[in-house]
Amino acid sequence: MNEPAAISAVLRTLADPTRRALFERVVGADEMTVAELTRGSGVTQGAISQHLKSLKQAGLVAERPEGRNVYYRAEPEGLGPLVDWMSHYGVFWRDRFANLRTLLKEIDP
Amino acid sequence: MNEPAAISAVLRTLADPTRRALFERVVGADEMTVAELTRGSGVTQGAISQHLKSLKQAGLVAERPEGRNVYYRAEPEGLGPLVDWMSHYGVFWRDRFANLRTLLKEIDP
DNA sequence: CCGATACATTAGCGTGAGCTAATACATTAG
DNA sequence: CTAATGTATTAGCTCACGCTAATGTATCGG
């Protein structure tokens, strides 16, 4: 996928609150099954599968089938296009760089 | 606006390709009128005004009326919620930190 | 004044997104 | 084998979105 399309895909995918919440839950855990993700989501299992399909196509999650379960995990590279796109507007980040600095130190002191 | 709503607004606003292109053009210049932004946009002036309204409500642009012209400029704080949201997933950035490091040095050597 | 210009707003149209309910398919349990 | 469980897929509904065309409003020029 070329970059502009990737950016559109990531933004469009994360724009939906239900789907973003789903992604955040996947991020929080190492792996989760569809059934676990359905519980407490407020929507049907079918809807969850559809959202996971979108997230997968956007490169934000990956799946690992095991028996009749399918475990989903977050995919690091998925947010890459968004990071790259925002890097283009780095001039706007200056007010927020305290956060980034903290983050940098925490990861690579 | 509370933070979750702000994130949704920013993501939803930037998800549309036409609107994102509009934002990128505003970022590229200091200020632009609606007529200038309409030229080469591929859509009607009315559509541009609608998109600018969305961008304004998301906090991504600001306006400065002057006579019968209205000058639009990019608004730094608008991307803040998105930066904050992504900071939460800093664990995913490691592959991309070269870019951020470069950016940091460039701004505060 | 009066026509032209710049922008905003509205109604209406077409399209796509998200949801449910139902179904299909594979796997496990008994 | 049969029933139950986990997941994906589909059809169909509703609704919001982006667009155009048209109109409204204010400002500038002659």
Image: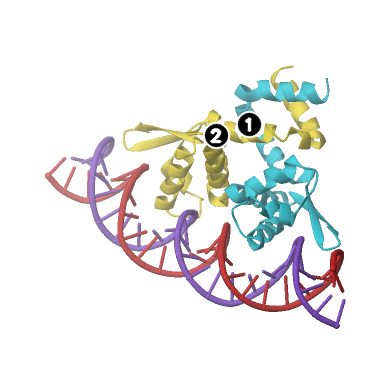
Chain colours: A cyan, B yellow, C red, D purple
The quarter of the rendered structure image containing the N terminus of chain A is bottom right
In x, y percent, where is residue B14? Answer: 57, 45
In x, y percent, where is residue A102? Answer: 72, 21
Which amino acid type is shown beneath numbered disc 1? Answer: Asp
x 46%, y 47%: residue: B51
Please say if A26 is above or below D7.
above
Viewer-nearest of labels 1 and 2? 2
Which amino acid type is shown beneath numbered disc 2? Answer: Glu
In x, y percent, where is residue A61? Answer: 76, 50
x 63%, y 45%: residue: A21
Comes first in the chain, label 1 or label 2:
2
Q: Quadrant of residue A103?
A: top right
Q: Nearer the viewer, residue A9 or B62?
A: A9
Chain of the residue on which disc 1 is drawn: B
Say which element carries label 2.
helix
Chain of the residue on which disc 2 is drawn: B
x 47%, y 48%: residue: B39
| Mark carried by residue B84 | 1
Q: Quadrant of residue A80?
A: top right
Q: CA distance from mark 1 to mark 2?
A: 9 Å
List the residue tagged with mark 2: B3
Question: Could one spot residue A1 in this view of the protein?
Answer: no
Say which element carries label 1.
helix
x 72%, y 36%: residue: B89
Label pair 1/2, CB-CB below 8 angstroms: yes
The quarter of the rendered structure image containing the C terminus of chain A is top right
Q: Quadrant of residue C7?
A: top left
- Left or right: where does residue C3 sit relative to residue B83? left
Disc 1 packing (10 Å; few <14; some 14–19; many ≥20): some
- Left or right: where does residue A65 sit relative to residue A35? right
